[in-house]
Image (spheres, rainbow, N blue to C red):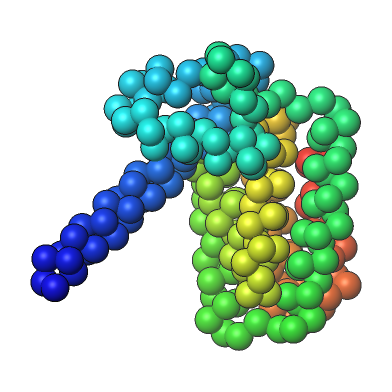
Amino acid sequence: MKRTQDWGDDLALAALTRSTLKDSTEALIRRALLSGAMRPGEIYSANSLAARLGVSNSPTREAMMSLVNKGLLELVRNRGFRVVELTDRDKQEVYDLRRLIEVEAVRRVAEQGVDPDQAALLRTLTEHTVAASGGRDMLEYLEADQQFHAALVGMLQNTRWTAIVENLRDQSRINGSYHLQERDLLETSALEHRGITEAVVAGDPARAAELMIRHLDYARP
């Protein structure tokens, strides 16, 4: 009985390790997509990318398939994976969806109210984003920005809603498609988090939604 239990524990540990490795590999590839290190239209094999990342083939392929399901990569039969290149119509569709669900999420958070700990978290993440906007590391800014918006929507305690918002945001930002840095709008965008945060903390749904709509203008095609 003891040996059977040990065998089961070993299987559970192996599954956990594999899942963790797949998730960490997916995070690395996602960063490469957002930074532009992986170029739209180019095809990458799981084997070559695994070698570049120093990871085995299996978790790399699993990670890439997960990113296919999220609309960031597309499978090219017998060749590998191509970085999705969004058309103007694609960008408009993503923007329209974000207007529908991200604005509504912020409105609902403001309507239901936030407690002091949640308010403190939003303010901390806001200042983290503002600080990141003053640096040269675009990835640091993108991750800080994602953390703020994910935390805000996450206060609805609807995991599917949060996951959809995170995925849409990634689709709209692949390969630096916002070009905020080039347009000298990085700090302006980050500072808008302060207004959104204070409207949410004040329990003003209309104001929070209005500011969020304005904030999303950067993603308008």
Q: How many numbered discs sit on the rendered protein?
A: 0
Q: Quadrant of residue 205?
A: bottom right
- The answer to whether 202 is drawn above or below residue 141 in the figure is below
Q: Residue placed at 46% from the left, 42% from the top?
A: 27
Residue at x 53% of width, y 47% of height: 143
Give the percent coordinates (x, y) of residue 88. Answer: 85, 28
Vertical position of residue 109 compared to residue 189: above or below: below
Check the image and name the residue furthest to the left. 2
Q: Position of residue 133 (x, y in %)?
A: 57, 44
Among the 4 quarters of the image, the one containing residue 156? bottom right
**Percent position (x, y) of residue 22?**
40, 43
- Looking at the rendering, in which quadrant would you find the C terminus? top right
Q: Quadrant of the N terminus?
A: bottom left
> Relative to 93, does residue 55 appear above or below in the rendering?
above
Image position, residue 100 (x, y; %): 86, 57
Q: 57 above or below 115?
A: above
Residue drawn at 54 percent across, 62 percent down? 125
Q: Can the viewer see residue 25?
A: yes
Q: Quick check: 30 left or right of 95?
A: left
The answer to which quarter of the image holds residue 206 is bottom right
